[in-house]
């Protein structure tokens, strides 16, 4: 037992030491001290949300199966599988549970969460164990598919629904994997088409209101040999950035749809007071973010990917 815990502890220590030695400080987007501050400042709501992401990403049947495995191990007093699972799960959850992020943060914890279930089924023959594992995976996908409408109604989406399109998120796979993957591909194609469309416009000064506008920024940068970029985050959580390239200037407002809808008219009014020529017909809210109707002139949105 102590040997297993020591191996995990030494492995974690070597990971952090090697990261410091191999990666320059400038490349570390979230150093350990910043992460510790984020954990201390986090809330119970964040922990509940991330725990939900962990369960949804693992799948409800697998999560229930893991709980059953824990119960069987406790009843049979098989402590070694439990300690092995806890040695991997507890550090992972302690590190990531207080930080808003995608399910991939918990990929290390997921297989170890199934260790007690595997230990409980260790007495089965190989064919039966293989049948149990296959059955769990199939049932997991079926349940994920069946519960998607309910989950979709209560999930905290970061964009408004688009007519006749399945909702998806890169945070966690919701519903069955294939449907989620297809929805993600369709959205990426649409965002890429919007980025190409906007980059081809002739306006020299454009205000872009969009959640996560990085595809547009990449498309603009790819078309020119040089660029200048600056960004600043407001107290409300909205990120304002400016990209100058090819003799054109693009001002971006990046945030949740509700924040953008509230902030955009104020930004336009403020900029127009400074320069009456700005943003007469060059405010763009991409349909992939489905921005609110804000009552100001906008570029005509591109409604379908080019053939």
Image (cartoon, rainbow, N blue to C red):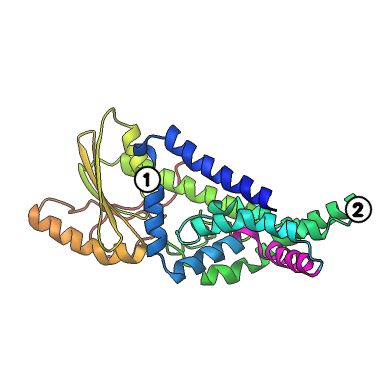
Q: How many marks?
A: 2
Q: Nearer the viewer, mark 1 or mark 2?
A: 2
Compared with 22, 150 (above or below) is: below
Mark 2 residue crowding within 10 angstroms, few (<14) / some (14–19) / many (20+): few
Label 1 vs 2, first from the N-terminus: 2
Say the numbered circle drawn on residue 214. 1
Quadrant in which residue 226 is drawn: top left
Say the numbered circle drawn on residue 46. none
Q: Which is nearer the eye, 79 or 121?
A: 79
Of helix, strand and loop, which one carries label 2?
Answer: loop
Q: Residue 190's x, y, as percent?
A: 45, 48
Residue 2 on the magenta span: no
Quadrant in which residue 121 is drawn: bottom right
Q: Residue 198's x, y, as percent?
A: 32, 44
- Residue at the location (43% across, 64% down)? 160
Q: Which is nearer the eye, 178 or 165?
A: 178
- What range is drawn magenta here? 57-75
Q: Which is nearer the eye, 28 or 271?
A: 28
Residue 68 on the magenta span: yes
Give the residue number, with chain letter if any, for mark 2. Answer: 125
- Residue at the location (37% across, 64% down)? 41
Farthest residue toward the front? 2
């Amino acid at each position: 037992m102590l040997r297993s815990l020591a191996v995990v502890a030494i492995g974690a220590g070597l990971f952090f030491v090697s990261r410091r030695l191999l990666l320059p400080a400038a490349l570390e987007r979230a150093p350990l001290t910043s992460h510790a501050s984020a954990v201390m400042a986090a809330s119970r709501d964040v922990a509940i949300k991330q725990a939900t992401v962990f369960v949804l990403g693992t799948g409800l049947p697998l999560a229930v199966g893991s709980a059953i495995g824990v119960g069987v191990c406790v009843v049979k007093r098989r402590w070694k599988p439990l300690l092995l699972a806890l040695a991997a799960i507890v550090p992972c959850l302690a590190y990531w549970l207080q930080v808003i992020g995608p399910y991939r943060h918990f990929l290390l914890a997921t297989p170890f969460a199934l260790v007690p279930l595997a230990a409980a089924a260790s007495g089965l023959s190989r064919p039966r164990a293989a049948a149990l594992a296959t059955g769990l995976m199939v049932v997991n996908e079926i349940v994920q598919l069946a519960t998607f409408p309910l989950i979709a109604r209560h999930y905290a989406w970061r964009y408004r629904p688009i007519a006749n399109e399945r909702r998806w998120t890169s945070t966690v796979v919701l519903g069955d994997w294939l449907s989620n993957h297809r929805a993600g591909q369709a959205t990426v194609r649409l965002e890429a088409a919007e980025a190409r469309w906007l980059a081809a416009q002739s306006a020299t000064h454009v205000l872009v209101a969009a959640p996560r506008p990085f595809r547009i920024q990449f498309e603009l940068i790819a078309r020119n040999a040089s660029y200048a970029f600056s960004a600043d985050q407001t107290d409300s959580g909205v990120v304002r950035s400016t990209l100058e390239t090819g003799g054109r200037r693009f001002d971006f407002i990046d945030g949740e749809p509700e924040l953008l809808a509230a902030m955009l008219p104020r930004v336009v009014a403020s900029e127009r007071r400074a320069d009456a020529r700005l943003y007469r017909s060059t405010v763009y809210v991409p349909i992939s973010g489905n921005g609110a109707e804000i009552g100001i002139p906008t570029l005509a949105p591109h409604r379908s990917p080019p053939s």
